[in-house]
Amino acid sequence: RILFRLYPNPVKNSLTLQFEDGIALNGMLYITNMYGCVVHSQQVNDARMRVNVRSLSAGSYIATYFVNGKKSSVKFVKQ
């Protein structure tokens, strides 16, 4: 089940994440590269948040949200 959506995709500088209604917050967001290395992590405290991805190299990444034993992942492209 998809717990969030992200946009724009592809992204240049700032990625917006919108979490589904009723999803428990206070989870963790991890962004990993295609090698599985975590390149960014942060606590989620709001139903909508922005993540600065300006420092990431161009390529494909996976944003994964973990909360209460649930996991949801969305692939995105950084230009």
Image: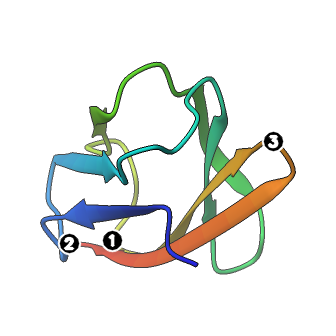
Element type at mark 2: loop
Residue pushed farthest front? 22
Q: Are marks 1 and 3 in contact (CB under 8 Å)?
A: no
Q: Amino acid at mark 2?
A: Gln
Can residue 53 be seen by looking at this rendering? yes
Does 71 sit above or below residue 75?
Answer: above
Q: Which residue is mark 3?
A: 68
Residue 2 in the image: state x and y as whole percent. 50, 74
- Is 10 situated left or right of 68 in this image? left
Position of residue 45 in the picture relative to residue 26 (left or right): left
Which percent across, then down, holds residue 52? 28, 35
Please indicate, yes or no, whether residue 60 appears anywhere in the rendered image: no
Quadrant of the image containing the C terminus: bottom left
Residue tagged 2: 79
Residue at screen point 36% across, 76% down: 76
Label 3 to label 2: alpha-carbon separation: 32 Å
SS of the residue under disc 1: loop
Disc number for residue 58: 1
| Residues tagged 2 and 1 counted as in contact (Cβ below 8 A) | yes
x, y (%) of residue 32? 64, 62
Q: Between 25 and 8, which is closer to the camera in this rendering?
A: 25
Gap in Å between the C-alphas at discs 1 and 3?
A: 32 Å
Type of amino acid under label 1: Ala
The structure residue drawn at horizontal position 23% and vertical position 50%, both measured from the top left corner, is 15
Name the front one of labels 1 and 3. 3
Few, some or many residues within 10 Å of mark 1 (<14, 14–19, 20+): some
Q: Nearer the viewer, residue 61 or 55?
A: 61
For the residue pair 75 and 17, the one nearer the viewer reads as 17
